[in-house]
Amino acid sequence: MGVFYQLDDVDAFTTAALGRPGARVFYLQVRQGETRVTVKCEKQQASAIAEYLRKVMNDLPSPNTKPLPTTFELHEPIEPAFVLGAIGLGYDRDTDRLLVQLEEVVVVDENGDPDPDALEDRGHVRLLLQRGQALAFCEHTEQVVASGRPACMFCGHPLDPDGHPCPKMN
């Protein structure tokens, strides 16, 4: 059985990128008490979570508080429990919390069909965020994503330090 975490009262939910721009590895980390779960993800996945949470938050009252900035740092263990695949997001009106469900990527065969054993054994992290935590996560994630390589002014693709084969300039 893969890892499964149900965290209903999280202390922190954050994203971080380790490495130099162009070779960064992105992580999501959730902490509740002594429980720390780190999940490796793609930059686009972290960005999509923040974008969706922002859209949901636009229809809700503004949060009263946000977590202190120190809650955004990654804490040990940084070793990921799994690599992120499917993401589930929603809002629970009964608890006034935003739902984030992270599922392990599933291996597929040459036909694109998932391995049935992998489906049964994949890791899950399900957490509920207060509105202030969600807003802080969005703001922090947007900063982390933006701190990467600058975009080419012609094509919008990321610029590498040693050059860029721009399709609009060829």
Image (cartoon, rainbow, N blue to C red):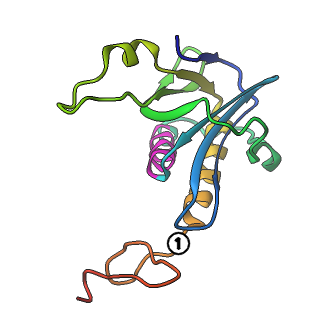
Q: Is residue 64 above or below residue 37?
A: below
Tell me if 129 is positioned left or right of 154 in this view: right
Residue stretch rendered in magenta on the structure: 44-56
From the viewer's side, name the closer residue of 125 and 79. Answer: 79
Majority secondary structure of magenta residues: helix
Q: Where in the figure is residue 111, as x and y percent of width and height? A: 17, 31
- 127 with respect to 72 (left or right): left
Residue at left 44%, top 51%?
44
* Picture coordinates of residue 20, whole percent (x, y): 62, 66
Q: Amino acid at mark 1?
A: Arg
- On the image, the x and y values in percent for residue 124 come to 52, 21
Q: Is residue 43 above or below residue 121?
A: below
Drawn side of residue 63 relative to residue 92, left or right: right
Residue at 31 percent of width and 82 percent of height: 166
* 74 is higher (above) or lower (below) than 130: below
> Mark 1 Cα within 10 Å, few/some/many (few <14, many 20+)?
some
Please identify the quarter of the rendering in which residue 127 is found.
Answer: top right
Magenta stretch holds residue 113 = no
Residue drawn at x 39%, y 83% is 153
Q: Secondary structure at mark 1?
A: loop
* Residue designated by label 1: 149
Q: Is residue 45 magenta?
A: yes
Residue lying at the far front of the rendered structure: 110
From the viewer's perspective, tell me whether residue 30 is left or right of residue 83. right
